[in-house]
Image (cartoon, rainbow, N blue to C red):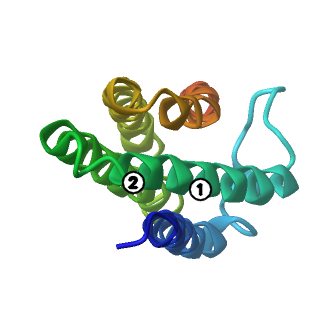
Amino acid sequence: MNKYIRIAVLVSLCLIVGYMGSIFTQMSINDWYPTLKKPFFNPPNWVFAPVWTTLYVLMGISGGIVWNEISKQPEIVKKGLLFFIFQLVLNLIWSYLFFGLKNILLASIEVVLLWLFIYETFAVFKKINRKASLLLIPYLAWVGFASILTISIYILN
């Protein structure tokens, strides 16, 4: 498979996961979410869509770069892509827990697990391709922020 097709496949996959998560978000963003007490550092709602879209694109490019190394380093690439898929699934689950089930406690626990899987993905990717790992740093930072935000919302409510 062409290296650009691999990147396009993973960017598309990440954007699909983002879209699926947005379905849960749309279910609650106008009625339940506004009723929650939020910390002073909670960004306005319009910030989330462009940030997440950018992060999903960066994630997909990162994953595609790593996938392109499969013939050179098959074992570690498979391990990295497995972590990549796990964190992507956890990313979707957070939206379901927070916005779908409206379970802030479970979402708070899950987002920490998500961050740990992203970090492990970053660490494995770094062994394969430094540029691919660097593309995950904004995602790590944002989910770190999202963890603090989610836990703060739980505490406030």
Query: Which SS class for mark 1?
Result: helix
Left or right: residue 132 versus residue 31 is: left
Location of residue 110 in the rendering, given as x and y in whole percent from the top left corner: 36, 39
Identified at 46% across, 49% down, the residue is: 65
Please tell me which residue lies in front, 130 or 59: 130
Q: Nearer the viewer, residue 149 or 91?
A: 91
Front one among 73 and 132: 73
Tag 1: Cα neighbours inside 10 Å, few (<14), some, or many (≥20)?
many
Q: Which residue lies at the image location 41% right of the left edge and 38% below the top edge?
A: 105
Q: Amino acid at mark 1?
A: Tyr
Q: Identity of the amino acid at label 2?
A: Leu
Q: Which mark is residue 88?
A: 2
73 versus 144 height, above or below: below
Mark 1 — residue? Answer: 56
Q: Please determine whether, in this image, residue 7 is positioned above or below residue 153.
A: below
Residue, x 51% and y 56% (percent of image)? 60
